């Protein structure tokens, strides 16, 4: 099977919340929140990429999320778009 999308490992600095409750200002520990995400690169623009965890053969994507390019620390291509990707042979379940 040929891949319709690049498969990539993206390391990025998330802008997530530090804590959800009341916290004394002296106890705040801001800093980077480094995240590793793996998925199919469904869309690319100058400002962001869209990763999808699942892609279908009918040109549909599932569970997609945006990552602003300014937050990307590292981009590692696992498999290029158009490359052959081995499909495991289904086996019987016990």
Image (spheres, rainbow, N blue to C red):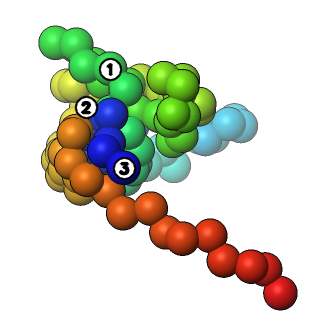
Residue name at image x 32 percent, y 56 percent: 85
- The mark closer to the camera, 2 or 3, is 3
Instruction: State the SS at label 3.
Output: loop
* Extreme residue toward the top, this view: 46
Say which residue label 2 marks.
71
* Residue 91 picture quarter: bottom right
Q: Which comes sooner in the sequence, label 2 or label 1?
A: 1
- The mark closer to the camera, 2 or 1, is 1
Q: Are marks 2 and 1 in contact (CB under 8 Å)?
A: no
Q: Is residue 25 above or below residue 46?
A: below
Counting from the top left corner in percent of width and height, residue 24 is at 59, 40
* Extreme residue toward the right, this view: 94
Q: Which comes sooner in the sequence, label 1 or label 3?
A: 3
* Residue situated in front as seen by the camera: 73 or 17: 73
Q: Is residue 11 visible?
A: no
Residue name at image x 54 percent, y 71 percent: 89
- The disc label shown at residue 1, or none: 3
* Residue 78 picture quarter: bottom left
């Amino acid at each position: 099977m040929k891949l319709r999308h690049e498969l990539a490992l993206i390391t990025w600095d998330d802008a997530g919340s530090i804590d959800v409750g009341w916290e004394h200002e002296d106890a705040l520990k801001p800093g980077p929140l480094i995240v590793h995400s793996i998925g199919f690169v469904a869309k690319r623009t100058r400002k962001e990429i869209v990763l999808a965890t699942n892609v279908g053969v009918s040109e549909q994507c599932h569970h997609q999320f945006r990552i602003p390019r300014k937050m990307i620390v590292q981009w590692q291509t696992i498999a290029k778009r158009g490359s052959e990707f081995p499909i495991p042979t289904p086996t019987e379940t016990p």
